[in-house]
Image (cartoon, grey):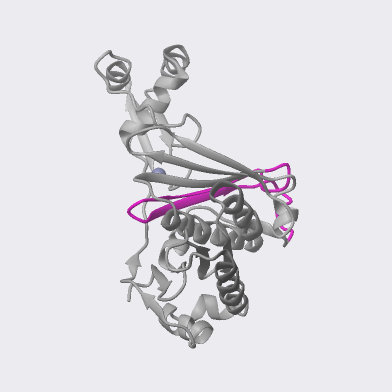
Amino acid sequence: MAADYCQRFIFEHFDIRGEIVQLEQSYAELLSKHHYPTPVANLLGEFLSACVLLSLSIKYQGKLSLQARSNGPVPLITVDCTSDLQVRGLAQLTEQAVGPALDQLLVDGILAITIEPTRGERYQGLVPLAEGGLSACLEHYFHQSEQLETRFYLASDGRRAAGFMLQQLPGQLQVSEWARVQAWEHLSALAQTVELEELLHVESEQLLYRLFHQEQVRTFEPRPVDYRCTCSWERSANTLVTLGREEISEILDEREEVEMTCEFCNQVYRFDRPSIERIFGDDFPSDASGSPALH
Ligand SMILES: [Zn+2]
């Protein structure tokens, strides 16, 4: 099995499904781009796992991002996952970013879940980051937006990151509300027994056996997850266009070329005078989805 993968499972007799994600290489690659203190590295691992789980539970083609802004030592944390399961992410921190708990790092945090489809309208949902951390916040989001009960378990230790999600499906096998509630209470109580250590280190099939060995669980083919930044020369060019010609001309008065560094992966894109002329020309394709700050 790939080092970084996710796996879907469903229960044969209940309208409930789940997803498991375990990450090591992609998480290591993300952490290698910047220096993060341990608590922030752990937080990034939780966000990364959560973002993959969200990506698996929402139907879309394009990019899904999970972003928190706060007044605390971590003013911004952002991770994204494409529908092909390519992930990247970063955190910005102030000097005091050493506290251990999520609510200490992301003081008064607001979580944004954004879907940028390849075609169609961008969607964004906002949820305050309250007590109980990221898991509780995402559970609240699904309860509000989809009226579906969901449980998230997230773990990360700076080396590995993992997540486990259990979610109610719309009624098909079980139509009685009472039976649905019973099934949910039963399976979520079993899921609750998962220990963070086993979530990080025990392979998904074995983990499912440990948790639900009395139930009939069907597992699907695991899918690989990879680190890959979606930045490109064209996207950086579009960001320059949003800054405006005047500002770019001022930079070019002082130096030979304009440099754009991707905040996620540190890739540097260079624009000399002729390429600046070209990107400000009428026939340069604009990228409507490129956000000016983080692209
Ligand atoms: Zn990049």
Quadrant where ligand 1 appears: top left
Say which residue appears at 68% left-offset and 58% top-offset.
Answer: 133
- Residue furthest toward the front? 176
Quarter of the picture holding the C terminus: top left
Residue in front for this viewpoint, 82 or 99: 82
Note whether residue 266 is visible. no
- Per the image, is 73 magenta? yes
Q: Magenta stretch: give its range.
A: 70-99
- Residue furthest toward the left? 283
Residue in front for this viewpoint, 35 or 289: 289
Say which residue appears at 44% left-offset and 85% top-offset.
Answer: 206
Residue 254 rendering spot, x and y as whole percentages: 45, 18
Residue 136 rendering spot, x and y as whole percentages: 65, 58
Note whether residue 29 is visible. yes
- Per the image, is 127 magenta? no
Task: Left or right? Give the position of 34 relative to 237.
Answer: right
Residue in front for this viewpoint, 56 or 143: 143
Quick check: 207 above or below 163? below
Residue in front for this viewpoint, 168 or 68: 168
Quick check: 182 above or below 232? below
Quick check: 247 above or below 188? above
Quarter of the picture holding the N terminus: bottom left
